[in-house]
Amino acid sequence: MKRPNYFIKTERAFSGVRKSAWIVTLAVAIGGQFYPRLGLLVPFIMAALIGMSFLKGRHWCGNYCPHGSFFDFLLLPISRNKKIPTLLISKITVVLFFLFFMFNLSRRFWTVFQNIANISLLDSVGMIFSTTYLMVLIVGGLLAVLITPRTWCQFCPMGTIQTLSYKLGKAIGLAQSQDEKVTAEHADLCHSCGKCARVCPMQLTPYKEFDENNNQFNDERCIKCSTCVENCPAGILSLSTAKQADELKEKADLDGFQESAYYKGEIKEVRELKEDIKEYTIKLLAPAKMNLTPGQFILIKVDDDLSRAYTISSANKEGTEISITVKRLEDGYGTNLLFDKFKEGDRVEIKGPMGKELRIDHKKKKLLFVANGIGITPFVAAAQNLLEYRDTYNFDGDITLLYGVRYEDDLIYDDLFTRLARKHPNFHYYKTLSRQDSINARKGYVTNILNEIEIDADTTVYICGTKAMAQDIQKILLEKGVPQESISYEDFAA
């Protein structure tokens, strides 16, 4: 199977301005060839971006730039979205192109003023800017399609001017209170999954470079577009000032992450559950034991500094062996690496345990687990541990599990849940198939089952699966009187 592209074509148009500013590019670049005075809009744009850059760096590039809007909104869908060549990012290229651009622009203005007696000044100046815009449209557009949308932005002269203005703004103190940078709530909450780097239009790597003091990303090339903020699986990124960053760090909720540590382990067994689903059992080496609560996850390093978060689907009683269950996704960079590279006997690096959303409170008397698809994995360990390791958890309550998939072949751990249901009267197992009739499972959705069974306000609920399913389940639960604080949800892709 071909490995997916590292860089992701994710939505980048977050505001009305950013989504529609490309109209200005086409109007000036193309319309300006017929009505040159349209080019006179450009000096005002330049003044705005320079003024903003003193306070916020390249914020204009990521939120207002007409060319950026054109690249991101219109050309991203047809872009190859590949890695930007190092040559186009190098400081030498940036400096040389800036000098060439400014020399060429100055030369054209000099020509206009030499002939000022014989020409219309406004039309001539407008044509200079319109032609410049057209050049950027053509060259930047070709680079956007052949490489990635923001290739031009790596050496854009206006971007260089913004960077220089930003440096000055920081030096004289203008940017101290206004500058908003990509900020991680707390370093311990980061999954090191690299998603921020994979979606970054500028192909920067925030997860590797957060400042250890306030968890801010200080790279001056950052265009503050919020793409990484919107796509962070852990939901810990924001655009914040330095003061706000300090407050975020101080108030960060680290519940569920306090005992997290780095482990070395060895893959003891790889079991194929389905054609696209594998279970990896890992023997811990150093430290040799992990203290975990069912529902937590680990980070497993899949490539250099890149990690992926996987729920612990089972663990032995001693905590010396843990298992994760992985579904191969067609566009899943991490899962493909895991499937293709990792085999029995391989050494792995792990960080964990982590997470609180699905950390099961075994002291509760009524538990409801709801899952669809691969979202079943956290409830494998939860059901097995609470029911089988009685002397460890002292659980004497009731568990109800609702599990929905499309087809019967999509069910995983069905034998385990069926066995537990037969052995333990306090475990109630319901499975549904949305696209197939079967004598072994009901046709429909988990919501159908939930509507029929009795649920009271004392029930503690844990949901793992698709966002749409979780929303439907929560709506039903609230109608049944279950308080919102008793409902926990986590996306299985986190």
Image (cartoon, rainbow, N blue to C red):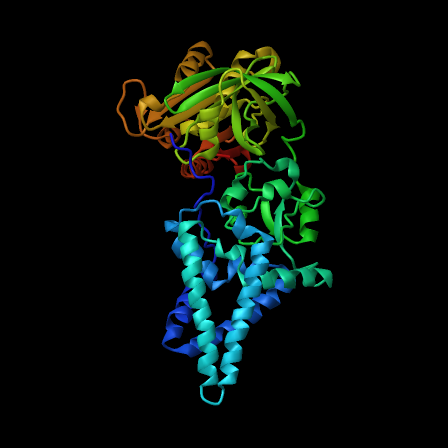
User: From this viewpoint, which residue is outermost toward the left?
Assistant: 437
* Side of 83 where 239 appears, left or right: right
Residue 144: image location, x then y, percent = 43, 53
Q: Could you tell me if residue 19 is visible in this image? A: no
Q: Quadrant of the N terminus?
A: top left
Residue 391: image location, x then y, percent = 60, 11
* Side of 221 where 176 appears, left or right: right
Between residues 476 and 77, which one lies in front from this camera angle?
77
Tally of numbered discs = 0
Q: Could you tell me if residue 470 is visible in this image? A: yes
Between residues 398 and 282, which one lies in front from this camera angle?
282
Residue 155: image location, x then y, percent = 54, 57
Q: Residue at x 63, y 55 (%)?
A: 180
Between residues 7 and 493, which one lies in front from this camera angle?
7
Relative to 261, residue 66 above or below = below
Relative to 468, residue 153 above or below = below
Relative to 73, residue 314 above or below = above
* Side of 147 where 243 appears, left or right: right
Between residues 141 and 218, which one lies in front from this camera angle?
141
Residue 379: image location, x then y, percent = 49, 23
